[in-house]
Amino acid sequence: MKTSKILIFINSLTCGGAERVASTLAGYLARSGCAVIVVTMQGREKDFYRLDQRVTRYCLDTAYDKPFLGKILVNIGNFRRLRRILLRDKPDVVLGMMTKCAVMSILTGLGLPVRVVVSERNFPGQKRIAWLLAQQRRLLYRHADALAAQTTEEAKWLKRYVAAANIEVIPNAVFWPLPAAEPVIPPRDWLDSGDKVVLAAGRLSQQKGFDLLIRAFSMIGTHRDGWKLVIIGKDGDAGDPGTRGHLVQLVQDLGLEGRVLLPGLVGNIGDWYERADMFVLSSRYEGFPNVLLEAMACGRPCIAFDCDTGPRDLIRSGENGLLVPSLDVTALSRAMEQLMNDQDYRTMLAQRAVSVRERFSEEAVMGKWKRLLGIEAYCGGLESVT
């Protein structure tokens, strides 16, 4: 099958792992000679990631602040808008990313000569979604032409619980060196030259477990006054118990003011990786954690909860990083202190961590996407690979 036109449908291009994958995949395919369309529910004003200039962009401009009946009408309107786009632009493949967009992609593609591929971007066994959406996923995913899972565990879950077939495991790719974007916040604005840094990054939400990380850091004691914990990330949704306000209150309750820093969203996260002495992933669950992959590619010694799913696909504990039992705050604290006490061990883990640059290279991962989308025969070579 020779495919020339691909439509990627995702909620937004705000800061997040799925959004980054969508934008980089769109750019890669466009540079490969494919015609690429990206459709988002939300408008451009919320964009964090920028698309290649060869990519066509449409926004459905969905409004979410609606009562129940209003949300139903919004969904109907989105269905009609997306269907019109499919009828007018006639893509050969539609890739629906994340559950809501995946379900809508299957529905809007019914009766049309279009191949529909869906992709979960988190572990569905842990990620809570609305009951109705979960039932739609259970009923509709089996009708997709193909599914992309990030890990073997996720693929097994999809096969067992939604009777999905034709599942391809496609991890995230690492891009090296990391590009910078706005807002640029230099580490020197927050840190003194002599500070040693434990870095964490991600959306400030309960999923990311920064509350657990702060508690683990508090257990290390004041004899580690030369170390600071820095948590980078955009604030989460109102009502989430892991947002900035909750974390600030926890820092105050534990007497960690000045030792735990929350700079917010940064576009130059590569500078923060380079400044860090170690990186910690404290998530309660994951899909495939971009930040851990990036930190390893930057040559940082890394510690991660062995959560569902992702870290164990990257870290071989004791060889290129450390895995600790999921949600075990005491074990996490001990692992951090172990690395704080042993610079040689940090150096060894850092040197071995960079092997992810090859294991999860853009060329290797994007090749999997091309095969799954059925476009390998069509797309030519890249104009340039940076």
Image (cartoon, rainbow, N blue to C red):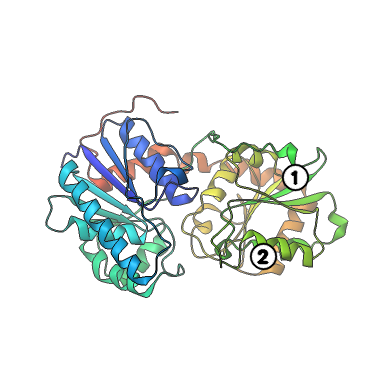
Q: Position of residue 221 (x, y in %)?
A: 84, 62
Would you name the residue on which mark 2 appears? 246
Q: Is residue 172 visible?
A: no
Q: Earlier in the sequence, mark 2 or mark 1?
A: 2
Q: Residue at x 82, y 63 (%)?
A: 255
Q: Is residue 178 left or right of residue 44?
A: right
Q: Quadrant of the C terminus?
A: top left
Report the mark closest to the observer, 2 or 1: 2
Identify the secondary structure beneath mark 2. helix
**Residue 4 vertical position relative to residue 79 in the rendered view, above or below:** above
Q: Residue at x 36, y 35 (%)?
A: 28
Tell me the tag on residue 344.
Answer: 1
Q: Residue at x 12, y 50 (%)?
A: 113
Q: Is residue 206 left or right of residue 25?
A: right
Q: Residue at x 37, y 41 (%)?
A: 25
Q: Position of residue 291 (x, y in %)?
A: 55, 49
Q: Position of residue 319 (x, y in %)?
A: 61, 51
